[in-house]
Amino acid sequence: MIKITNLKKSYDGGIEALNGVSFDINPSEITGYIGVNGAGKTTTLKILSGVIPFDEGEVIVNDYRLPEDALKIKSITGYVPETPELFNSLRVTEYFDFLKDVREIEENKFLKRVEYFGELFDFKDYLNTAIGKLSKGNKQKVLIVSALLHNPDIILLDEPLNGLDAYSIITFQDVISKLAQRGKTIFYCSHLLDIMEKVSDRVIIIESGKIKINSSKEELKSNNDFKSLENIFRDMNEAGSKKEFSYDEIFD
């Protein structure tokens, strides 16, 4: 379980990324995290993964507390960042071997998992290829697998579908759904509202560093005015801020 209370984070120049954010993320659920660019989504995930510090508030992950228990939290967390930083000169197998040692995964379990995920995501033929020579989609598969190899209790996903083909997206959705059924805590950030609506058990919408909506999917759908997440997202904007494309205005 993840519990965030009154979380605040500002960057140089007075940019306020998070302003008193509070919510819980429960095990056995996929929690979707939605917001426009700059709303504070990636900042939240970077804080939870221990990549960056926060200014105020409280963060508890499975009874561990940030920042004092950062190493323990990292050991039980799998994180797929929005912008990957991989060792492009390493072969995929070399990178996975490095993770095996860091995560202290038993050799037999490690080999079984690499073989299985290679088959599942259809990239076993690239295991001996340098990461820098992989396509964007195959690099993303490496990121996803690297986040899951140690069987983490906490899974943080920031735009995990970048570059994936349609078949791999379907496979990924199946993977996280079954991991949630096994009691994993899954926090999933994406701009793909249709997919978020499909896979999420709970939806949190953040705007300008503040939580605007925090509801289960069932609660949202029980509202007579509910049509889709896209409509909720549109309606959150003030009328003056909505933008619509006009072909005649620009091209005629």
Image (cartoon, rainbow, N blue to C red):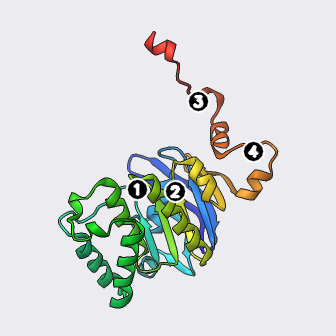
Spot occupied by residue 237 in the image (x, y as percentages of width and height): 63, 36
The answer for how far apart the CA atoms under marks 1 and 3 are is 27 Å
Q: Are marks 2 and 1 in contact (CB under 8 Å)?
A: yes
Q: CA distance from mark 4 to mark 1?
A: 29 Å
Left or right of 25? Residue 173 is left
Residue 156 located left or right of residue 97: right
- How packed mark 2 is, by other alpha carbons closer than 10 Å (few <14, some 14-19, many 20 or more), is many
Amino acid of disc 2 = Cys
> Are the residues tagged 3 and 2 within 8 Å (C-beta)?
no
Single out the mark in the foreground, 1 or 3. Answer: 1
Q: Front-most of 106 and 73?
A: 106
Rounded to the nearest whole Å, what is the CA distance between mark 3 and mark 2? 23 Å
Judging by the rendered image, the residue that carries numbered circle 4 is 226
Q: Which residue is mark 2?
A: 189
Q: Secondary structure at mark 4?
A: loop
Where's residue 111, x and y in %?
34, 84
Q: Please, is residue 119 above or below residue 238 in the view?
A: below
Q: Amino acid at mark 4?
A: Phe
Using the numbered discs, state the Cα–Cα distance from disc 2 to disc 1 in whole angstroms.
9 Å
Q: Are marks 4 and 3 in contact (CB under 8 Å)?
A: no
- As helix, strand or loop, the secondary structure at mark 2 comes to strand
* Residue on which the image places disc 3: 241
In the rendered structure, find residue 82 and report the number of the disc placed on it. Answer: 1
Q: Is residue 170 visible?
A: yes
